[in-house]
Image (tube, rainbow, N blue to C red):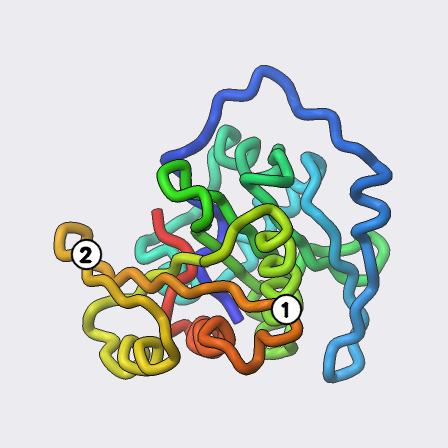
Amino acid sequence: MTTRAWGRAPIVRDLMQAPTVDSEFIRVRTTDVVLDGGTTICVRPIVPDDRQGIAEGLARLSDETRYSRFFRSVDRLSERELTYLTEIDYRDHFAWVATSKETPPSGLGVARYIRSQDEPTIAEASVVVVDAYQGKGIARVLLELLSGTALEHGVTAFRSYALPSNRAVIDSMYKAGTSVTLNDEEGFVRLDVELPAVTGLRDSAMYEVLRAAATGAISLDRQ
């Protein structure tokens, strides 16, 4: 599953130095996950040292995946964007990464949320999985982790986007209880979905959003 992946470039901050990362904070949140097909991956919070992996991960996405997820062509990320995406506060901006168990490990996917400054209980979310590993359940694992983390930090809804022409998906989101708002100025349909308890994810509107994202029908992030 892939969606718009790398966060919102317009809100890049100027950072004088990399933040200090608590190694114990990362360690206790690092775990191995066995996917349905038997493959074992490692998931953990993102760290500043992941900047090269993020850049390489973008290069491993197909042109079609990049365009359908970013709604535009993206060839590379600037140094400022890489800093913003990897040097985070783990509260208003949180990201989980999935890596292989190889030595050295390779990046497989990233899921992140960025809290809205104007609406602090809402966050724009994103998830991407490199093309070679799509359809294996990695995005579901990352988004379930992201949902739980967001709830812990007071985020109660994720915001996503779809093209107005995608009526089938918009209608299914509406029937599932998702708030649907057409933004004529920007040309997108905004979908706001409440976050359920993680244990209730499969019976919620959020799960319908994940299913739509898995087919590339909607984007969970927009720039």
Q: Position of residue 51 (x, y in %)?
A: 63, 39
Image quadrant of residue 67?
A: bottom left
Left or right of 200, for residue 63: left
Q: Is residue 22 above or below residue 45?
A: above
Q: Position of residue 159 (x, y in %)?
A: 40, 57
Helix, strand or loop at mark 2: strand
Kind of residue at badge 2: Asn
Q: Position of residue 197 (x, y in %)?
A: 61, 67
User: In front: 57, or 118?
Assistant: 118
Q: Is residue 176 above or below residue 192?
A: below
For label 2, the crowd category at 10 Å Cα-Cα, with few meaning under 14, some 14 to 19 and many 20 or more, is few
Kind of residue at badge 1: Val
Image quadrant of residue 37?
A: bottom right
Image quadrant of residue 209?
A: bottom left
Q: Residue at x 39, y 49 (%)?
A: 74
The residue that label 1 is drawn on is 198
Left or right of 117, for residue 21: right
User: In front: 32, or 102?
Assistant: 32
How many marks the image carries: the answer is 2
The residue that label 2 is drawn on is 183
Q: Residue furthest left?
A: 184
Q: Residue at x 66, y 24 (%)?
A: 18
Q: Residue at x 41, y 72 (%)?
A: 216
